[in-house]
Amino acid sequence: MFENLSERLTRSLKKISGKARLNHDNIQETLREVRKALLEADVALPVVKEFINQVRKRALGVEVNQALNPGQQFLKVVESELIQVMGDANEKLNLAQQPPAIILMAGLQGAGKTTTVAKLARFLQEKEKKKVMVTSADVYRPAAIKQLETLAGEIEAEFFPSTAEQKPVDIAKDALKQAKKIHADVLIVDTAGRLHIDEQLMGEIQSLHKVLNPIETLFVIDAMIGQDAVNTAKAFDEALPLTGVVLTKTDGDARGGAALSVRQVTGKPIKFLGAGEKTEALEPFYPDRVASRILGMGDILSLIEEAEQKIDKQKAEKLVKKVQKGKRFDLEDLRDQLQQMQNMGGMASMLEKLPGMGNMAKMAEQANMGKQFKRMEAIISSMTPAERKDPELLNGSRKRRITRGSGTEIQDLNRLLKQHKQMAKMMKKMKGGGMAKMMRGMGGMFPGGGGGMPPMGGGGGLPPGFGQ
């Protein structure tokens, strides 16, 4: 989400961070660049002004002038002010209420409210071990009710049915009764959205708020609408006592301005970021981690947490033991590794979280690495178990059969075999070290196929034993 902003800021800050002495002129020049980058990223003008003033005040003060490395100290000032703008620390949901704790979701149509209800329900079930019930008070879109029912079934949350003929307030009252009856810990209520703010929408959601008296009222914003997102949040905040914001579609071509503006403009914290359609694609918002990502410093903590949750530890350990015993790394193992990476959001998503790898993440995205990985998986899946164990068996006729079965070309298969050979060689030399070393072998998969990508642990990379 912050690609363009990150690129611009990193470029302008690089010039100053290496300087042993700072003066009024080079600080002013850098701040001009930073201001431009923030405005182009759709950050609200009052937020940009306040941010630049604070950085200038601190940069011209004692803390930078008397530092051992003024250039790097300036970078630290920018980072801490970014964190300040976005809200200091992650603010968790407040569920300290006599069960069921009620969460009311508000927002415009198309922001991804219904999907966010399901994502939030799944998050609370898996991370907080809560019994969650969801219901839809969107009587204008029967498809929204059906969509929520389907999603609730997928994540195994309780669903309270409603129809387009009912009144939203009646649905809310009945859902609350049922939630108490089944001893649900949390009740999440989806509401109707409109294409724009209107009196009817505001009146309706105010009535629902009055009836339910929710402990959390979350505003769902589409990050891709940029500056408008902040104005909309402001209007909702004036009509409702919002407790937080969920920023959706952060995987799209968003400029990131909404994330940097919404806290300052509304005074309400961003509690979650949503990326993609999948129900697991919701993560708590940590201002410090996001600031680090924006400044190209990576986000190792989020990467480790993701690995803890999504990597199949048994498979990872099995492969480590296999390699330690000197056994051959076969194509079945390679397929497992590709799947593990896909589970973690793919190569681009992982690179983005590694320090100084923002450009590599961009290259991976442009090269459509996800598509390449899927093609590689399809080729391996078209082989027999014997062929996966011993690629030496692959003669001309077997290769033709495999490429026909996987819908690929002979050169795709040959490239895969070359990359596998490189990885197997690397594995042979490897003694322990787990996922960090394993992933270095992915180098040969980058565009060009010749190992043109730096090791995954480069520049501060992954900690030893990562993923075990």
Image: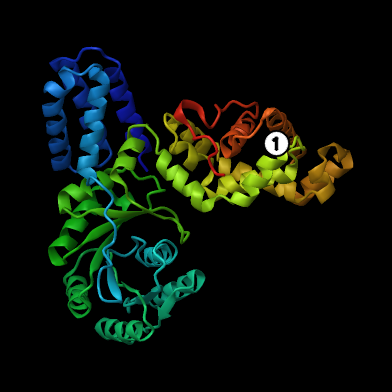
For the residue pair 277 and 243, the one nearer the viewer reads as 243
Q: Position of residue 411 (x, y in %)?
A: 74, 35
When the figure is inspected, residue 64 is found, relative to residue 439, above or below; the finding is above
Q: Position of residue 176 (x, y in %)?
A: 30, 82
Q: Secondary structure at mark 1?
A: helix
- The reply, left or right, for residue 268 in relation to residue 422 is left
Determine which quarter of the picture holds residue 428.
Answer: top right
Query: Would you say residue 171 is visible in this rendering?
Result: yes
The quarter in which the N terminus is drawn is top left
Judging by the rendered image, the residue that carries numbered circle 1 is: 324
Q: How many marks?
A: 1
Q: Position of residue 156 (x, y in %)?
A: 49, 73
For the residue pair 53 and 462, the one nearer the viewer reads as 462
For the residue pair 208 and 17, the one nearer the viewer reads as 17
Determine which quarter of the picture holds residue 15.
Answer: top left
Q: Position of residue 343 (x, y in %)?
A: 55, 50
When the figure is inspected, residue 204 is found, relative to residue 347, above or below; the finding is below
Bin the neighbour count of mark 1 within 10 Å (Cα to Cα): few under 14, some 14-19, many 20 and up: some
Identify which residue is drawn at 57% across, 40% down: 369
Q: How is the image coloured?
A: rainbow
